[in-house]
Image (tube, rainbow, N blue to C red):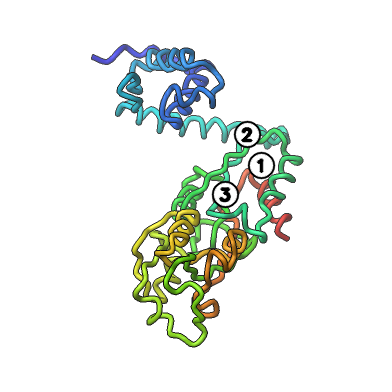
Amino acid sequence: MAKQANLKSLGDVDIRLLRVFVVVAACGGVAASEQELNISKSTISRHISDLEARLGLRLCNRGPAGFSLTTEGTQVLELTRDLLAGIDEFRSRVDAIQMTLTGTVRFGLYNQSSANPNAHIERAIAEFDKVAPNVRLEITFDTLTALEASVCNGQLDLAVMPIYQPNPTLDIKHLYSEKMSLYCGKGHEVFGLDTTDLDPRKVLSPYKYAGYYFNSPNMRAGNELHLERAADVKDEDALALLVQSGRYIGFLADHFTEGAGGSRAYWPLFPNRASYQVEFAAFYRSNPKPDRKTAAFLKCLFDAHA
């Protein structure tokens, strides 16, 4: 039988308890969230118990068998995220009136942005910290489709990722580019092979190809060469590992291979015929328009890549 709820009104204490619950759920347990919350396990456990008592619901199973959310806990977690996002939005709008930038900018990135010499996102972050020192940054790495969906539904304020398909609900602004080439790793049968006068399809068809499993420039490039994926990956680190094994071929950013041993570790195959250029841009919603803190971060991004 469900406990009687004791939540007749929502106060600051309840908000604090809900924030603790979100962190515990994200970390996967009370012990795992101890460092993130910077409070003891016993205090965290008491906060969760207090929240359950306030709601009249059991939110999670915790004990020797491990941590897991209950069905009710999953539902409350989703509602809590919506609530906290609403609070953040309220604060942002009040800040717009007060002309003070606070709150959080939720920022998505795709793959090796920090290693690309054409990407100056670190400069944008440094400048933004001067402009808005009280604004928190939340940075998420994910696939193209996941990042785009998160910007569209408001879970992210903006994302920097490749331009790969039009989306009329989003505004984009070009930032930088990178060249992707087809590589094999040391130990592969065609490592060191001069492919200048050879037919790519005949040479490549016997070998295992690793590529991204989602709609992307990488997928299109593989399809154009009629390469069938023998391994599916989500990010460039995983792809590089497969190529390093000497058993797979795959498209990698030239700047990545140059910084990881160059032609001693990665051999380019058909560099003039099996390569493509990726254009990276900032993606953000056109409606509603970015709030002041997001607009400030976007300006820092644009200025850093001007």
- Name which residue lies at 61% across and 65% down: 177
- Asked whether, in this view, residue 282 is left or right of residue 274, the answer is right
Q: Residues within 10 Å of mark 3 (few under 14, many from 20)?
A: many
Q: Earlier in the sequence, mark 2 or mark 3?
A: 2
Left or right of residue 12: residue 64: left
Query: Could you say which disc has been placed on residue 158 in the image?
Result: 3
Which of the two labelled residues, at mark 1 and mark 2, occupies the earlier sequence position?
Answer: 2
Q: For mark 2, what is the residue?
A: 103
Identified by mark 3, the residue type is Leu
Look at the numbered discs 1 and 2 and tell me whether their residues touch, using CB distance below 8 Å.
yes
Disc 3 element: strand
Mark 1 neighbour class, 10 Å CA radius: few under 14, some 14 to 19, many 20 or more: many
Q: Which residue lies furthest to the left in this view?
A: 1
**Callout 2 crowding tier (Cα within 10 Å): few <14, some 14–19, many ≥20:** some
Q: In this view, does 288 lie above or below 243?
A: above
Residue found 67% across the figure and 59% down from its top:
117
Q: Distance between the residues labelled 2 and 3?
A: 15 Å
